[in-house]
Amino acid sequence: MKIEIEAEELIAILDYIKGQRGLIGNADDLAKAIKEKLPEKIKRLTETRDQCVKSVPISSNYFSDWKS
């Protein structure tokens, strides 16, 4: 099936579709929100990592017995 369309009609359709889309958000606002929350997120991830590292016991027997 072949559809023929004039350039003016295509432009009109594209303009109509473009007009139907609403703005999703502002990139500057998104960057500000990320920048404000980033230090808190890094601190929380670091604390979680430190808790995990401290909670895992490492014994010398664990690593020496892995071949058995």
Image (cartoon, rainbow, N blue to C red):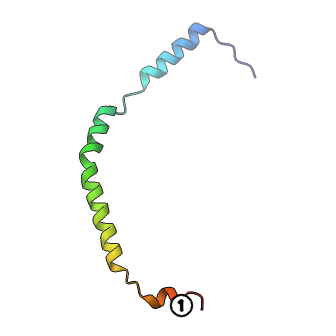
Question: Could you say where residue 57 lies in the image, as x and y percent from the top left?
Answer: 37, 84
Q: Residue furthest right?
A: 1
Query: In the image shown, does 51 or 28 lie closer to the viewer?
Result: 51
Q: How many marks?
A: 1
Quadrant location, the N terminus: top right
Taking depth in this image into account, of 57 and 25 the one nearest to the observer is: 57
Query: Could you tell me residue 22's position as x and y percent?
Result: 38, 28
Based on the displayed image, in which of its 4 quarters is residue 52 positioned?
A: bottom left
Q: Is residue 10 above or below residue 22?
A: above
Q: Which quadrant is home to the C terminus?
A: bottom right
Residue type at tag 1: Asp
Nearest the eye: 38 or 15: 38
- According to the picture, the residue beneath numbered tag 1 turns out to be 65
Q: Residue at x 57, y 7 (%)?
A: 8
Q: Is residue 32 left or right of residue 5?
A: left
17 lies above or below 24: above
Q: Quadrant of residue 59?
A: bottom left
For residue 16, above or below residue 22 = above
Q: Looking at the image, which residue is at 25% across and 49% down?
A: 37
Picture quadrant of residue 50: bottom left
Q: Nearer the viewer, residue 35 or 65?
A: 65
Q: Give the percent coordinates (x, y) of residue 64.
A: 52, 88
Residue 20 lies, in percent from the top left, at 43, 24
Q: Secondary structure at mark 1?
A: loop
